[in-house]
Image (cartoon, helix red, strand yellow):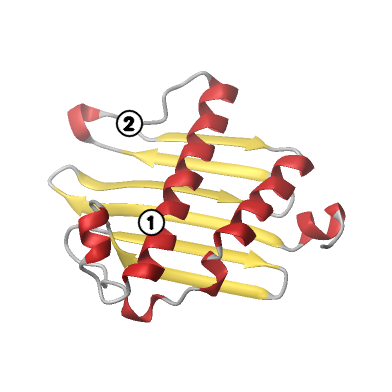
């Protein structure tokens, strides 16, 4: 395992999920930069909501933990070639740089595990599905704890 300094310097993560519909471009996006900056954006025009944008720096320990979560999830071993392509329902994007590994996945929005099980790569998409669930939970916790807002 590498040192804490190396873990902070060679790690980047970005997640996006969104669609364009009758309420315009609605999306959730967040990224962790190598320096620990967490950028969060949630845009919904439903009931005239406005965009929520937040930025906060997380500790080196948090970045180390995030990298551990990525490595243990085995998401870096997956391939999105057989995953559903984005459609009118929406798209998801996941980009991770972890050491010398750089992945960029794009797939359709996943409504439930039924969508995962019906795909051409249920095992790989299941890893993605649960990883994204865990990641969103972590980010929502960080944002709500720091800013005292409900991100959803």
Q: Is residue 145 above or below residue 95?
A: above
Q: Residue furthest top?
A: 148
Any mark on residue 98, and which? none
**Secondary element at tag 1:** helix
Towards the viewer: 10 or 117: 117
Does the rendering let one see residue 106? Answer: no
Residue at left offset 52%, top offset 18%: 148
Q: Is residue 139 above or below residue 47?
A: below
Answer left or right for 38 relative to 5: left
Q: How many marks?
A: 2
Towards the viewer: 29 or 61: 61
Mark with earlier residue (2, 1): 2
Q: CA distance from mark 2 to mark 1?
A: 27 Å
Q: Is residue 42 above or below residue 114?
A: above
Residue underneath mark 1: 129
Residue underneath mark 2: 50
Does the rendering let one see residue 103? Answer: yes
Answer left or right for 94 relative to 146: left
Residue at left offset 40%, top offset 70%: 124
| Mark 2 neighbour class, 10 Å CA radius: few under 14, some 14 to 19, many 20 or more | few
Quadrant in the rendering for residue 44: top left
Quadrant in the rendering for residue 52: top left
Answer left or right for 27 relative to 78: left
Residue at left offset 49%, top offset 71%: 104
List x then y, in percent, for residue 145. 56, 23
Towards the viewer: 34 or 117: 117
Residue at left offset 36%, top offset 31%: 152
């Amino acid at each position: 395992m590498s040192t804490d300094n190396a873990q902070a310097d060679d790690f980047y993560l970005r997640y996006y999920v969104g669609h364009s519909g009758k309420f315009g471009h609605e999306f959730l996006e967040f990224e962790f930069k190598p320096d620990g900056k967490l950028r969060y954006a949630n845009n919904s025009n439903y009931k005239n909501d406005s965009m929520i944008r937040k930025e906060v720096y997380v500790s080196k320990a948090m970045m180390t933990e995030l990298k551990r979560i990525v490595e243990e999830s085995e998401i870096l071993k997956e391939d999105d070639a057989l995953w559903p392509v984005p459609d009118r329902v929406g798209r998801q994007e996941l980009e991770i740089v972890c050491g010398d590994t750089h992945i960029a996945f794009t797939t359709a929005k996943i409504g439930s595990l039924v969508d995962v099980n019906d795909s051409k790569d249920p095992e790989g998409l299941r890893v993605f599905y649960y990883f994204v669930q865990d990641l969103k939970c972590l980010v929502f916790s960080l944002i709500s704890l720091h800013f005292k807002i409900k991100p959803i």
